[in-house]
Amino acid sequence: MTPKEKAIELIEDCIQIQLPNKDLENNYEMAKIQAEYSANVAKWSHKELSEKHFYWEEVKKEIEKL
């Protein structure tokens, strides 16, 4: 899965677990924050600078672009 695909998947997952809210823009922004946090946790779970560490850094960058 590419970093962009993973970023989209994380945001979609975060939207699904939110309480229903009429403010869709706010829901999306909150989902982006949650997805970025998840990617950051995953990134730092790989203490050494491995391929996975860099993959999650790319996912974070893709989340910011969306």
Image (cartoon, rainbow, N blue to C red):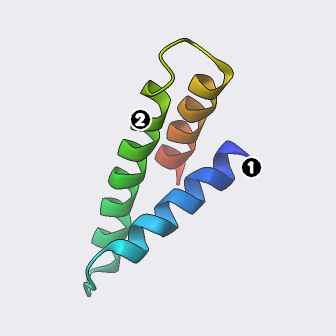
> Could you tell me which residue is drawn at 47 percent across and 16 percent down?
47
* In the displayed structure image, the side of residue 40 where residue 53 appears, left or right: right
Under mark 1, the amino acid is: Met
Under mark 2, the amino acid is: Asn
Q: Establish if 47 lies above or below 38.
A: above
Q: x%, y% of residue 45? A: 45, 28
Q: x%, y% of residue 12? A: 50, 68
Q: Establish if 22 lies above or below 33.
A: below
Q: Quadrant of residue 15?
A: bottom left
Q: Which mark is on residue 1?
A: 1
Q: Establish if 13 lies above or below 4.
A: below
> Could you tell me which residue is drawn at 50 percent across and 48 percent down?
63
- Give the alpha-carbon distance from disc 1 to disc 2, as whole Å: 17 Å
Q: x%, y% of residue 2? A: 73, 46
Q: Which mark is on residue 17?
A: none
Q: x%, y% of residue 60? A: 50, 39
> Could you tell me which residue is drawn at 57 percent across and 12 percent down?
49
Q: Residue furthest right?
A: 1
Q: How many marks?
A: 2
- At mark 2, the secondary structure is helix
Instruction: Give the crowd class for mark 1: few <14, some 14-19, many >=20 residues within 10 Å.
Output: few
> Could you tell me which residue is drawn at 40 percent across and 65 percent down?
14
Q: Residue furthest top?
A: 48
CB within 8 Å, label 1 to label 2: no
Q: Which residue is mark 2?
A: 40
- At mark 1, the secondary structure is loop
* In the displayed structure image, the side of residue 49 where residue 13 appears, left or right: left
Q: Earlier in the sequence, mark 1 or mark 2?
A: 1
* In the displayed structure image, the side of residue 23 where residue 5 appears, left or right: right
